[in-house]
Image: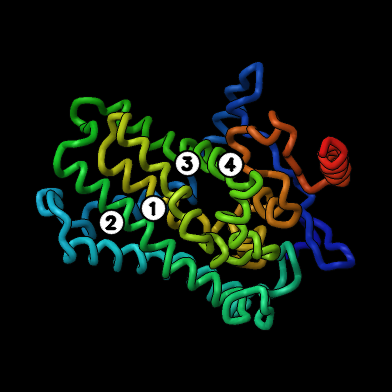
Amino acid sequence: MKDSDFGTRDKRGHWTPNKRPQRAPIFVWPFQPIKFLKWLPGYLWPWNLAYFAVALLSWMFLTPDLARMQSFEIGWMLAILLRNAGWTLLFYGGFHLILYVQRRQDTNFKYNAKWPDSDNPTFLFGSQNAENIFWTFCSGVPVWTAFECVMWWLYANNLVPFLSFATHPLWFVAALILMPAWRELHFYLIHRLIHVGPLYHLVHKVHHKNVNPGPWSGMSMSTLEHLFYFSGVLIHFIVPLHPLHAMFQLMHAGLSPAKSHVGFDRIVTSDEAAINTDNFYHYLHHKYFEVNYGERRIPLDEWFGTAHDGSPEADEAMYRRIRAKKLVR
C-alpha cells in the first residue's frame, strides 16, 4: 500500500490525502439517517472503543476501592500516577517505536517527510522528542493524575452527583457514547481561548513548537495548558455521572493525543490494509496555526470560518482572512 495511491506529495515533501475531511452527518440538514448509521461505527471503532476498553480495565483492576480514597494518601495516589504513566508509555511509546524508531513504513503516508528535529536549540535539550517526553511525563501525567485523584476523593465522599447503571441504564450508556463529543466541544472552547493574545504566549506556545508533530507532541504542553486541557472532567461537578464516565473521559484526554499527533495518515499493517489515524485535520492546525481549532464531529470551525480541508481553495480563504485581520489592526 503506497501513499501515492491515496494522495499527492509536493516538492517540499508535504503529503496531502485525496479525500478531504468532511463534516460528520450529525449536523447535516435535512437529517440523513442512512449516512448517520454508516458513520456511527467509525465514531466508535476502533479508537473510542479502545480508549473505553483501557478505562474499563483501569476502573476494574487498576484503581483502588473508593472507600480507600476517602482521604488523600500517598499510596493510592502514587499507584494511579504509575498506572497513568504506564498507559502513556504504551500508547505514545508504541506509536513512536513503530513509526519513528523502527520506521516500519518509512515516510509512507507521513504528512511531512522530515523527521523530528534532533539538533534544534528551539527545543529543550536540542531535541523535539526529548522536550515532548519531558513535558508529557513531568507535567502532563502528573496533572492528569491530580485531576483524577480529586475526582475519586469527591466520589468517595459523595460530594458530586452519582449515577448508577441500575437506576438509569439508558442515560448511563448514552453518556458513555457522548463523552468523546463532550471532549471535542471542551477542547475547542479551551483551545480557541488559549490562541488569544497573551494567553497564547503564556499557555500554548510550548505546544506549537511542534510544527511537524509526532506522537509525543500530543501532550507536550505547558503545565498551565495541561490544567486547561484536563479541566473538562469538571463537568462531573454538575452532571450526574458514574466514576467510569470520569475514567473514560480522563483516559480519552490522556491517551488520544498520541493518535491525533502521530503525523501519519495511516498505519500500514499489510500490503493491502492500513489503520486510518484520521488526524489530517489537526495536522493542518499545526501546519497553518490559525485553522482547525477543533475537530470535525462538531463543525465549529466551519461555523466560525476557520475550517481548512487541505485544498488550494482553503489556502486562499485562510490568506484572505489573515489579510483582513491585519487590515483591521
Q: Are marks 2 and 1 in contact (CB under 8 Å)?
A: yes
Furthest residue toward left: 67
The mark nearer the N terminus, 2 or 1, is 2
Q: Which disc number belongs to residue 172? A: none
Q: CA distance from mark 4 to mark 3?
A: 15 Å
Spatial CA span between label 1 and label 4:
23 Å
Disc 4, SS: helix
Upstream in sequence: badge 1 or badge 4: 4
Q: Which residue is mark 2?
A: 58
Is 114 situated left or right of 318 in this image?
A: left
Q: Are marks 3 and 2 in contact (CB under 8 Å)?
A: no
- From this view, report whether residue 273 is shown above or below residue 168: below
Residues at marks 2 and 4, CA–CA distance in whole angstroms: 32 Å
CA–CA distance in space, label 2 to label 1: 9 Å
Please determine whether, in this image, residue 65 is positioned above or below residue 37: below
Q: Are marks 4 and 3 in contact (CB under 8 Å)?
A: no
Instruction: From the image, state whether disc 4 or disc 3 is nearer to you.
Output: 4
Tag nearer the camera, 2 or 4: 4
Q: Give the label on residue 193, or none.
A: 4
